[in-house]
């Protein structure tokens, strides 16, 4: 009986072995199934990588995306919303539900810190060696801006360069026999002449001097007193100071109040929305502004300006001398133009993580960086020695969305806007109040939106004469006690001092 069962067992075993031996092997061309636990795929299957960010206007087909996909054997999926508020609302819902994109636009240190401290983000510290090309490109000092609490939660994008300077209508100066203003007093005189002396010589009282988008129109006035915009932090006399606590702030507000009282400022300044102040400039109503060069010197801007007045001539001028010297607005030395983070869940998907690092490195090295700046070589641009010459910019206007680690700004701007090289260089070279606000993460107990709203409301009251400047100290006291601004001041000062020591 035992022998019978043994023989049956042997027969079954032989059949099993024969079946295994006859099973056909998978063809090398047959795609392997994805391993969702590790993110691994076979070498022939493009790895899908989802990028969540703000943006609009992605074409279909997308030549930049297609070129990156081909170069890295990946399949990029962009999940973008034009509105930053909508984007972050959607992102918060996704993160709360554990539905993580592969690459997350966290945008700034504050959001990055919030997500990182909740355990949602991957600490990149153990992977630094795999990101070396990207680090070399953005620079180690910039890369450190993605570090919170000793953990590298962010991959920063190279910061943008300054764009704003003072601009004046040279043809209006000539019509009135005036020189280019070089001091705050001369700025005031020119502003009055532009408003009351018919600078466009049309016989109508239809011009003003200064326009802009809210309080930002007076950036150049604040800096002339050596202070940043309301609420900004900078170093003065060796100490970190907030502009609202700077004694010179009240003097700057008094100067601005005087300009408004003189009637030389756009009556709708605070109410201006979107690009209304830009349109007013194009329509020839204003002649002395603190604007970015892009809104005046770009070809499209000049076309709109000349359409209304062919003789209009705008020129940049150096910052007027004031009590604080010749500082031309402010520049945030702690900023990055974007901040990217990766979800912690990727630590269990090593193959996908490797591909993501390849993506950041690719757009940081020369071949990929040229692609995301100018498009495809031979189609959108050509090389003449080391110089890039754009041949067809159409179809790649969206390429900036793929400049994930940024671009060499001087080269990029010179290549794309060479006709405005003088204006670009002028804006970059101006000395500015160096602020550190982008560095700051908010302490518990401080609600920035409430404090910012109160600051904006009260500053507007001061400069429009609806609250006397004699009450400025009372304003600060309310800000510190009611809105916990003192907690914020102490925390921000500590963070900035620590950053400066590095």
Image (tube, helix red, strand yellow):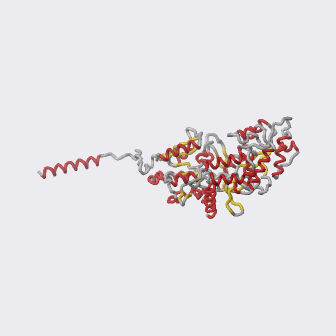
Task: Give the image location of residue 460, x and y in percent.
Answer: 71, 46
| Quarter of the rendering containing residue 381 | top right
Lateral position of residue 37 relative to residue 61, left or right? left
Outermost residue, left side: 1
In the displayed orientation, state which residue is furthest to the right. Answer: 177
The image shows a total of numbered marks equal to: 0
Of 96 and 260, nearer the camera is: 260
Q: Is residue 305 visible?
A: yes
Please name whichever residue, 362 or 205, is drawn nearer the observer in this view of the structure: 205
Taking 258 as reference, is 82 left or right? Answer: left
Give the percent coordinates (x, y) of residue 71: 53, 48
Name the residue nearer the viewer: 406 or 472: 472
Seen from the viewer's position, the closer of residues 125 and 307 is 125
Q: Position of residue 274 (x, y in %)?
A: 67, 40
Name which quarter of the figure residue 273 lies in.
top right
User: Residue 471 at what x, y percent from top left?
Assistant: 73, 51
Q: Is residue 277 left or right of residue 143?
A: right
Against 277, residue 324 (above or below) is below
Q: Is residue 345 above or below residue 392?
A: below
* Quarter of the C terminus within the rendering: bottom right
Q: Residue at x 54, y 52 (%)?
A: 114
Q: Compared with residue 326, is residue 176 higher up or lower down, i.e. above or below? A: above
Whether 308 is drawn above or below 139: the answer is above
**Visible in this render: residue 410?**
no
């Amino acid at each position: 009986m035992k022998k019978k069962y043994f023989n049956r067992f042997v027969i079954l075993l032989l059949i099993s072995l024969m079946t295994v031996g006859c099973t056909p092997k998978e063809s090398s061309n047959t795609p392997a199934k994805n391993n969702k636990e590790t993110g691994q795929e076979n070498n022939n299957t493009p790895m899908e990588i989802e990028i969540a960010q703000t943006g609009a206007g992605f074409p279909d087909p997308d030549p930049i995306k297609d070129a990156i996909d081909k170069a890295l054997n990946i399949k990029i999926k962009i999940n973008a919303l034009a509105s930053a508020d909508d984007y972050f609302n959607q992102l918060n819902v996704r993160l709360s539900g554990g539905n993580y994109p592969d690459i997350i636009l966290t945008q700034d240190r504050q959001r990055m810190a919030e997500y990182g401290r909740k355990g949602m983000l991957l600490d990149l510290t153990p992977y630094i060696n795999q990101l070396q090309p990207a680090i070399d490109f953005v620079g180690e000092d910039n890369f450190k801006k993605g570090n919170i609490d000793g953990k590298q939660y962010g991959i920063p994008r190279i910061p943008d360069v300054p764009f704003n300077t003072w601009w004046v209508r040279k043809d209006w100066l000539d019509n009135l026999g005036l020189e280019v203003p070089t001091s705050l007093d001369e700025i005031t005189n020119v502003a009055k002449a532009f408003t009351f002396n018919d600078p466009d010589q049309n016989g109508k009282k239809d011009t003003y001097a200064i326009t802009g988008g809210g309080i930002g129109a007076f950036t150049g006035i604040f800096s002339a007193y050596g202070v940043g915009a309301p609420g900004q932090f900078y170093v003065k006399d060796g100490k970190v100071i907030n502009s609202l606590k700077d004694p010179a702030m009240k003097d700057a507000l008094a100067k601005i109040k005087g300009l408004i009282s003189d009637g030389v400022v756009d009556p709708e300044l605070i109410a201006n929305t979107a690009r209304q102040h830009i349109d007013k400039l194009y329509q020839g109503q204003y002649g002395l502004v603190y604007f970015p060069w892009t809104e005046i010197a770009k070809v499209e801007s000049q076309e709109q300006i000349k359409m209304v007045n062919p003789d209009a001539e705008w020129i940049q001028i150096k910052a007027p001398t004031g009590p604080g010297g010749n500082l031309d607005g402010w520049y945030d030395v702690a900023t990055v133009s974007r901040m990217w983070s990766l979800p912690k869940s990727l630590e269990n998907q090593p193959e996908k993580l490797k591909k993501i690092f390849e993506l950041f490195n690719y757009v940081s090295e020369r071949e990929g960086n040229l692609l995301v700046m100018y498009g495809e070589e031979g189609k959108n641009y050509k090389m003449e020695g080391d110089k890039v010459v754009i041949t067809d910019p159409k179809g790649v206007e969206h390429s900036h969305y793929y400049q994930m680690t940024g671009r060499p700004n001087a080269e990029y701007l010179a290549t794309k806007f060479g006709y405005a090289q003088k204006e670009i260089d002028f804006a970059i070279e101006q000395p500015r109040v160096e602020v550190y606000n982008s560095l700051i993460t908010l302490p518990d107990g401080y609600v920035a939106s409430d404090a910012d709203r109160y600051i904006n409301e009260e500053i507007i009251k001061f400069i429009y004469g609806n609250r006397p400047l004699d009450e400025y100290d009372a304003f600060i006291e309310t800000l510190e006690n009611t809105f916990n601004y003192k907690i914020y001041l102490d925390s921000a000062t500590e963070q900035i001092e620590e950053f400066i020591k590095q």
